[in-house]
Amino acid sequence: MKALEDTLARAADEVRHKVAQVPARAEGAARVRVRTARLVRLGALLALMLSLGAVYFILGPGSSPRGFVAPPTEPERQADVYILFPSDVDSMVGELTAAEVATWEGVEYASFWGPERTLQDFSELFADQPSLIAIVEQDPSVLGSSVRVWLTPDADSDALVERARQTFPDAVSVETRDERNAGVTTANGESAVTTIAVPTELETAGIDLQDEILADGKVSRDESVRAVARMAACMIEHGLTGVTWSVDASGGGWSGGYASLAGDERAGAGDTVAAAEEAIYHLCFYSYVNRVGQGLDRVGQGAEWGPTELAATVGAFLPVLEELDAQLLDLLNRATQIEYDWENREETFANTTNALNTLRADLESWATAIAGRSDIPSDLEAAYAALVDEASDLPEAAEAILLGVQAPDDGTQRKTALSAFVQEALDVVYAIDTLRRGG
């Protein structure tokens, strides 16, 4: 009996210790204090229940009450609802929020994910892509904090989302899985994704590009094309696939996106994938486009693009460069889709090798067409020669992917070849960019 009393006393001390760790609230935050106090009581009760569970374990199966059930484990599937908080939310508040949500009818499980846990999960998932990990490690806060909620099959998700919004007014937002996986579409310089903070470190090349474009206080369509195209290259370089972009012809608008893997069960760890994809997107958006986009607020007010400052002959050649950029993006996306389908066994070996052979032939035709153009402005001849040289490397790079598919290894040769192909394609993008700014 004495041993039981000592164990219960230690459990009570643990509860008091957890309550004492909750930070005090500032004056004037009565509503928040009331809700936090309720969460503290719930957390204390939870801690006591867990401590009592330990007591029953110590006493042995014969002494365990029939009603005690161990807490469930976190489901492996993607969460159904996300309660998003600022990245610096106190972890105790996050844990207690999850504990309260777990008691709601229709909730199977709720768990708090801070930036540290998300970063760890991301690092394990993309262990073979250190460049992606480095992007997020620069500022783990971009991954945000959230309480992730898994619902039972018969749950009313709309009602639970509304309840979360009413119960936690300090949350940044409450999203369903479908809303989180809806993808990214931007227009007029505004991002449709609002749950990721602005990165603290941006790419120097992008900052310099935006400074150059905004130096004269105007944004021409061709300058906007440069910014958006370079943003797309940044997204590709950091691992996003299915990247698309376009710039309006009549004035001021642009759009872009990528093929998110977050909703694909084959990708695994969908929540972490979504957070990583958004972090990369935001890095590239704020590095290359954000300030340029802010200069396009005239959209809808009858304003037109600023004038192109290049020589008339060079300016007339710019649509050709935009067409080449779009063609290259299509070829690059074909390569990454072939890789993805083969990696996930969505296509047979025969279909994969045929697709790569076709891609290589198309790249040869494309490079030959570039080399055969005779309408190059004299101001651009030197820079265009560099483009011809870069484009000529692509067919061989595609051939290396094919050899990797045929290689009797674990896929390392193929993946290395695909990475090399992407870099060769980006070299072409940069050569086009050099031409777009006049050589």
Image (tube, rainbow, N blue to C red):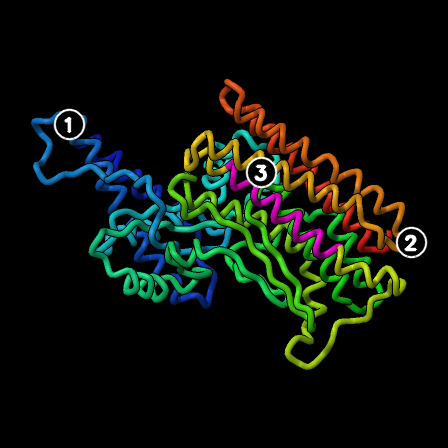
Determine crowd level at label 2: few under 14, some 14-19, many 20+ residues with C-alpha closer than 10 A: some
The residue where tag 2 is placed is 379
Q: Which residues are magenta?
A: 321-339
Q: Residue 438's spot in the image, x, y percent?
A: 86, 55
Mark 3 residue type: Thr
Of the residues tagged 2 and 3, which is closer to the observer? 3
7 with respect to 205 (left or right): left
Q: Closer to the N terminus: mark 2 or mark 3? A: 3
> Does residue 343 belong to the magenta stretch?
no
Residue lying furthest right: 378
Report which quarter residue 64 is drawn in. top left
Question: Residue 2: which numbered mark, if any?
Answer: 1
Q: Secondary structure at mark 2?
A: helix
Q: Residue at x 12, y 28 (%)?
A: 1
SS majority, magenta: helix
Q: Closer to the N terminus: mark 2 or mark 1? A: 1
Of the residues tagged 2 and 1, which is closer to the observer? 2
Q: CA distance from mark 2 to mark 3?
A: 35 Å
Q: Residue 265's spot in the image, x, y percent?
A: 38, 42
Q: Is residue 105 visible?
A: no
Residue 337 versus residue 24: which sits nearer the camera? 337
Question: Residue 358: which numbered mark, if any?
Answer: 3
Q: Residue 143's spot in the image, x, y percent?
A: 51, 47
Q: Residue at x 81, y 49 (%)?
A: 373
